Image: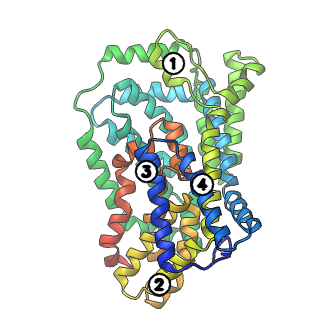
Amino acid sequence: MFPINPKHHPLLSESIILFIAIIGLISYFIIGLETVPHIPILIGIFSLVAYGLVKNITFKSLEEGMVAGAKSGMGAVFLFLLIGVLISSWMISGTIPILINSGFSFIGGTWFYAIVFAITAIIGVSLGSSLTTTATIGVAFIGMASALDASMAITAGAIVSGAFFGDKMSPLSDTTNLASTIVEVDLFEHIKHISLTTIPAFIITFILFVILSPNETMPLEAVGEYQAALESTGLMHWTSWLPLVILVFSTIFKIPAFIALALSSSIATLLARIISGLTWSDIWSIWFNGYTADTAFEPVNELLTKGGINSMLFTVSLVILALGFGGLLFVTGIIPSILYAFKEKLQQVRTIIVSTAATAIGVNVLIGEQYLSIMLTGETYKSIYQKAGLSNKALSRTLEDAGTVINPLVPWSVCGVFIADVLGVPVLTYLPFAFFCLLSPVITIVFGGRALNR
């Protein structure tokens, strides 16, 4: 059931005390001292290694646990580096500038946050990837929010909410396929079943963003300044839409994400070379360091100066640390003992649903990885649901409602670190406004029991 075999079996009380201490440590450093997440995670690694050695676990076993944990996220690491290239190549091909420019044509201040949420949700369902959606249309929207003088926190919350609605509901999504596969439920039956909680969460979220949206639109003169500056870059052409079209078609034909992103980035780069006149030397430098805009209008320079492999190194380093930390939590037996305790003491239907959601959330918080949250919780509770006479659809729905959408709300998680880096908005800043992600587990706990076997 577990990706790493525990070398120690602590008492439940000991595991809970360690769990509270670890979360307290991380929270104090990030919230209280306002440090980057790397520091408390690294201190947590030191603490777990010391704990393991005290419990007579060999350093070799501890090291193997760290490596195995980090290895589980290497696919994401390569994807993050490629997304850095994608953003910079979409800048020089004019794809992101033309998305921003087009957005100014039909989005003002009225219902701004609600429209951002709805469009991001549609794109999310089309692409099937929350991270790709955030790194493309999300970057464009966060730039528009800056130009409109809208709240960056609420805009980021709307982007995250829409992207993860798409991640839940798209048949192309990795997490949607994983949740249905792990508990042996037909993919489209799974999507139909999760709509029972997802659609209400979507409607409530949309209404909240309508209420929060500013009443006044941006003055036409200000819009004109931004659009004129975007035009002055010389990046925007009709061909600027091609990298986006290629990415959409790649996902429709179920081309693996890495290949789809590489193909879109390559086409965008080639278009930039042909049309914008950049030298290959300039392009390779932009691939690594990102694009730096140089217009006469500073707000647009800030808006377009993004991307590059270098911009992803903060994210990559934290992901490796966090997953290595997760590996130590397994090899020391802390997570396995808590999961086994949940499994042994569950009888009532409502308690099972609540415990499933709590476990999925807990794995996200401790390890910061949504795939492991779905896999471990699914494997742990599958037999419990069968014993209680509950359908596997109920389990797969709860996995999505409390597993998939919680990851972007954890500052040291894979998704949280990536989104904060790409959008330039800290997780704890946008967290209160990621309404869809906050509502999904609440709705599945409150109303889940009424629709368990439909």
Nearer to us in this view, 127 or 21: 21
Q: Name the residue under label 4.
A: 322
Q: Residue at x 64, y 77 (%)?
A: 8
Q: Quadrant of the N terminus?
A: bottom right
Find the distance from the CA under tag 1 to the CA under tag 4. Answer: 33 Å
Q: Is residue 127 left or right of residue 28?
A: right
x%, y% of residue 275?
68, 18
Task: Check residue 385 in the rendering and tell me which mark sits there, or answer none.
Answer: 2
- In whole angstroms, how far apart are the C-alphas of marks 2 and 3? 37 Å
Residue 74: tell me if it is visible.
yes
Q: Name the residue under label 1.
A: 301
Please tell me which residue lies in front, 271 or 340: 340
Q: Is mark 2 on a helix, strand or loop?
A: helix
Image spot of residue 413 (x, y percent): 53, 53
314 displayed left or right of 354: right
Q: In this view, does 325 lie above or below 153?
A: below
Assign a secondary structure to mark 3: helix
Instruction: Give, as a three-letter code, the residue at label 4.
Output: Ala
Q: In which quarter of the image is residue 158?
A: top left
Question: On the image, which quarter does residue 316 sit in?
Answer: top right
Q: What element carries label 1?
A: helix
Mark 1 Cα-neighbour bin, 10 Å: few <14, some 14–19, many ≥20: some
Neighbour tally class for label 3: few under 14, some 14-19, many 20 plus, Cα within 10 Å: some
